[in-house]
């Protein structure tokens, strides 16, 4: 497992809404070795403040050595990243963590909500590439409003996976939650549900999977200082009563490994 | 005297002695910020380090504190990891073989909640191949004294030092807590009790509050402040301690660059440790070694030892 600290040039910046952005970075070592579900740690500046790197899922990689991150402004670091211009350099560290486990022979159902859509493009791409044909797989994407979902749909559609969409305010797709859609679907008993999004959403997805007795993989967040197992700061309680470290044991876990507050 | 000049002429002489422990350069990794070193093997050249200090080890495994355990603050971070570690036996059986193979001095940081625990860990580390020294974290609560940290009281600090020295078969470095009113007093007590060297500072106790939730950010309420924010305090304490003890002093606190490291050495540190900086830049420690080397060359110093304690102070 190799990790790299790269000086990545920003190739392209895209603004999807007031707060949602996507950056394309030239980061060949990371692009070459990344797996779906892994993340990178990015320095928002070069000074002493803000000090720590920020974790972001790898949104997708390209064969010409680029990676993308898709993010929302929530604080100082993300605000600084939103102001980055094409041609600027960023210090990017990765790929980090354990990604999704893909089962070649059984259907996949991807459920992404809000910023949780970020890692799902890379996952969908990897599943389709591995299987060749993703006719039995499905994706449910949701957000609060249209601008959180619609700008991303085009990239997902490229592989021909069946897509189901939802927004809380009904401005795009189904009026309601991704979990409403999930509940209404028939699930193959050997399918795997992959989910990333707000905690209550993931907890609900896992509940549904438990009832239907299907496998569920979740990608979770935690505050991080190092992203690579050195600080032990990113702990998360497990169902065994111990702590897992999100950067090392995750960010993708089998849902049953973690404690969920519903 | 002890430094036979066997080096190639183009390489700067970075060797320093921490008492009887001879290291190739003055840069060590600070406990709790470098895992068990293996985490960094693909990110830097571990062989460039003067020494590795590993995550603090207790007698029995500790699970650590509930999350959130860390929060970023201005130019620094607070942590309340809660001294999570695998315990001394698993450390020896699972981690030590790799570390011994590295062929760089490995200093084991130990912690306990009683004198007996400190002694027992020290005993179990005796004769373990690869262990070059012990660093004693005395910033831990003394359970028998109602949870007051050993390091905050000169007599308790002295008692821990004595207890560990009694059993240790390698040099003992005592790591001071900065959360005291007179650091020089603790340092002298530790020196008098036989410490071979003193490292400082451990983290400063701090706190962060979330206005929105009206709660402390850390689950543990309080945590240890580290990073560039603490460097001025650390420098001051290293200066004060180096002025009153005659054993080597190792400077820690907010060191990110060779310049930072050299400032500590001027203030009296024989060596330094890199902590939080490794989280931001996993190669920080190696880059500091390189930077110190460049400084020694550009200043035409015979060796890095020539700047230790060379601070000019005009006292009025
Ligand atoms: C594995 C992983 C993958 C992530 N992927 C994405 C992604 O693809 N897109 C995206 O928009 N966001 C993602 N996040 C969340 C993202 O890291 C935070 O939004 C970001 O760190 C906020 O930084 P800030 O300086 O803007 O906010 P501030 O609130 O100012 O940050 C203060 C500190 O808290 C930390 N922090 C704040 N919010 C979070 C959070 N939700 N998770 C972890 N740390 C946080 C920051 O890193 C920083 O150390 C991911 C988090 C993790 C752990
Ligand atoms: C996440 C974290 C964990 C730490 N764990 C330990 C520890 O187990 N034992 C110890 O003696 N010091 C521990 N420390 C303190 C550091 O070794 C160091 O003294 C302190 O962080 C100041 O240096 P810095 O500013 O360079 O980080 C820890 C610090 C951090 C940030
Ligand atoms: S973020 Fe440092 S151990 Fe996970």
Image (tube, rainbow, N blue to C red):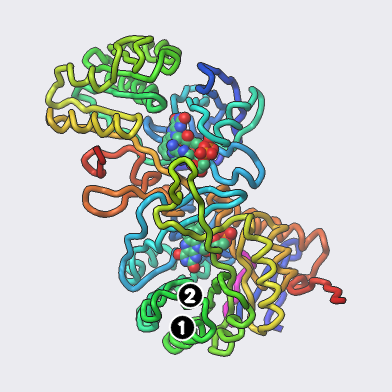
Horizontal side of A204 relative to A91 (left or right) equals left
Look at mark 2 in the image and give the residue it sits on: B138
The magenta span reads B20-27
Horizontal side of A35 relative to A162 (left or right) equals right
Look at mark 1 in the image and give the residue it sits on: B160
Which one is in front, B257 or A233?
Answer: A233
The crowding category of the residue bearing disc 1, from other C-alpha atoms within 10 Å (few below 14, some 14 to 19, many at least 20), is many
Question: Which chain contains the residue that carries disc 2?
Answer: B
Above or below — where is A100 with respect to A186? below
Query: Which secondary structure, mark 2?
Result: loop
Q: CA distance from mark 2 to mark 1?
A: 8 Å
Whether residue A129 is visible, yes or no, is: yes
Query: Is label 2 on the same chain as label 1?
Result: yes
Above or below — where is A11 with respect to B122? above
- Residue in the picture at 24% in, 17% down: A137
Q: x, y (%) of residue A188?
A: 14, 21
The crowding category of the residue bearing disc 2, from other C-alpha atoms within 10 Å (few below 14, some 14 to 19, many at least 20), is many
Horizontal side of A162 relative to B133 (left or right) equals left
């Amino acid at each position: 497992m190799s990790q790299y600290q790269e000086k990545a040039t920003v190739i392209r910046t895209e603004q999807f809404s007031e707060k949602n952005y996507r950056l394309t970075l030239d980061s060949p070592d990371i692009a070459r070795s990344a797996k779906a579900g892994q993340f990178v740690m990015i320095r928002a500046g070069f000074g002493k403040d803000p000090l720590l790197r920020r974790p972001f899922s790898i949104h997708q990689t390209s064969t010409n050595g680029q990676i993308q991150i898709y993010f929302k402004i929530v604080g100082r670091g993300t605000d600084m990243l939103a102001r980055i211009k094409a041609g600027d350099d960023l210090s990017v560290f990765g790929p980090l963590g354990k990604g999704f486990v893909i089962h070649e022979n059984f259907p996949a159902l991807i459920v992404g909500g809000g910023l949780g859509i970020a890692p799902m493009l890379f996952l969908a791409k990897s599943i389709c590439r591995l299987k060749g044909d993703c006719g039995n797989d499905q994706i449910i994407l949701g957000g609060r409003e249209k601008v959180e979902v619609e700008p991303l749909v085009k990239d997902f559609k490229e592989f021909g996976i069946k897509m189901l969409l939802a927004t809380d305010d009904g401005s795009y797709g189904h009026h309601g939650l991704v979990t409403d859609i999930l509940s209404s679907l028939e699930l193959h008993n050997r399918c795997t549900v992959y989910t990333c999004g707000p905690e209550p959403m993931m907890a609900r997805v896992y509940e549904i999977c438990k009832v239907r007795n299907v496998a569920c993989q979740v990608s979770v967040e935690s505050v991080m200082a190092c992203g690579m197992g050195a600080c032990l700061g990113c702990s998360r309680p497990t169902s065994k009563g111990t702590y897992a470290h999100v950067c090392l044991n995750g960010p993708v876990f089998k849902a049953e490994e973690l404690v969920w507050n519903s | 005297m002890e430094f036979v000049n066997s080096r190639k002429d183009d390489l700067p002489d970075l060797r320093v002695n921490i008492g009887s422990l001879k290291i190739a350069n003055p840069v060590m990794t600070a406990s709790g910020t470098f895992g068990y070193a293996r985490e960094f093997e693909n990110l830097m050249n571990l062989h460039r380090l003067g020494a590795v200090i590993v995550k603090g080890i207790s007698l029995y495994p500790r699970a650590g504190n509930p999350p959130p355990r860390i929060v970023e603050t201005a130019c620094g971070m607070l942590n309340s990891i809660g001294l999570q570690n695998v315990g001394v036996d698993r450390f020896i059986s699972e981690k030590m073989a790799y570390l011994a193979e590295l062929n760089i001095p490995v200093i084991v940081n130990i912690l306990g909640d009683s004198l007996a625990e400190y002694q027992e860990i020290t005993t179990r580390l005796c004769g373990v191949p690869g262990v070059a020294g012990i660093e004693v974290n005395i910033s831990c609560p003394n359970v028998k004294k109602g949870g007051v940290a050993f390091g905050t009281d000169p007599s308790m600090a002295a008692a821990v030092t004595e207890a560990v020295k009694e059993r240790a078969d390698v040099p003992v470095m005592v790591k001071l807590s900065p959360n005291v009113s007179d650091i020089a007093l603790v340092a002298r007590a530790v020196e008098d009790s036989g410490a071979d060297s003193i490292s400082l500072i451990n983290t400063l106790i701090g706190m962060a509050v979330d206005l929105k939730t009206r709660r402390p950010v850390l689950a543990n309420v309080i945590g240890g402040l580290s990073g560039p924010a603490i460097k001025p305090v650390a420098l001051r304490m290293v200066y004060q301690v180096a002025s009153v003890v005659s054993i080597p002093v190792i400077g820690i606190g907010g060191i990110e660059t060779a310049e930072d490291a050299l400032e500590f050495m001027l203030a009296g540190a024989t060596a330094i440790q890199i902590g939080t900086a490794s989280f931001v830049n996993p190669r920080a420690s190696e880059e500091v070694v390189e930077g110190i080397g460049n400084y020694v060359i550009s200043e035409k110093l015979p060796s890095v030892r020539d700047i230790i304690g060379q601070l000019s102070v005009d006292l009025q």
